[in-house]
Image: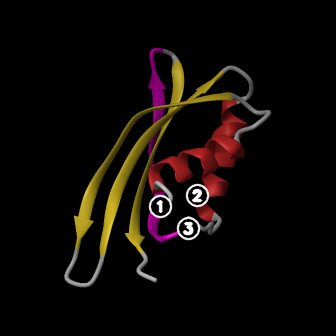
Amino acid sequence: MTDPAKAIACRLKHSCRGLAETRVRDTRSSEWRSLLFDGAQHRMAIELIGGRPEEAEASIRAAVATPFDIPGHLIADISVRTTGAEDQIPTIVVEALTVRLIA
């Protein structure tokens, strides 16, 4: 089964190709359960280095708004939570909730 945090990070990095170099840091995942579902909550900070960071951010926002598949998982919620700069590097924080699919 695919690691959903890695799949999301890969998708978002790919969306910035040619716009800015990206570095994913501070990735956290924690198990999440309800009465009916098992899954995980994910949070990652994506640094936009050089290039055109404003366009890269817009591309990430568009990628988050466009449905995509992760084998074995359903993306129940995904959003850009905060943007800002850490150490003068534009940084975007993305949070997602994924649900594990049972075949």
Between 53 and 39, the residue placed more toward the observer is 39
Provide the residue span drawn in magenta.
Answer: 71-87
Residue name at image x 73 percent, y 28 percent: 52
Determine whether label 2 and label 1 are within 8 Å by CB. Answer: yes
Asked where in the image residue 49 lies, by quadrant, the reply is top right
Query: Where residue 9 sits: x, y (%)?
Result: 54, 45
Q: Earlier in the sequence, mark 3 or mark 1?
A: 3
Q: Which residue is mark 2?
A: 64
**Residue under the image location 69 percent in, 47 percent down:** 59
Disc sitting over residue 78 in the figure: 1
Task: Spot the residue most to the left.
Answer: 35
Tell me the distance, in whole angstroms, between the alpha carbons under discs 3 and 2.
17 Å
Q: Is residue 96 magenta?
A: no
Percent of width and height locating residue 29 = 32, 49
Q: Which mark is residue 47?
A: none
Regarding residue 80, the answer to whether it shows in the image is no
Element carrying mark 2: helix
Instruction: Using the image, determine if residue 73 lies above or below residue 13.
Output: below
Identified by mark 1, the residue type is Ile
Task: Residue at 46%, 83% (x, y): give it.
Answer: 103
Q: How is the image coloured?
A: secondary structure
Label 1 residue SS: strand
> Is 60 left, or right, of 76 in this rendering?
right
Vertical placement of residue 77 versus 28, above or below: below
The earlier-in-sequence mark between 2 and 1 is 2
- Amino acid type at circle 2 is Val
| Mark-to-mark CA distance, 3 and 1 | 16 Å
Reading the image, the residue beneath label 3 is 71
Q: Position of residue 91 (x, y in %)?
A: 50, 31
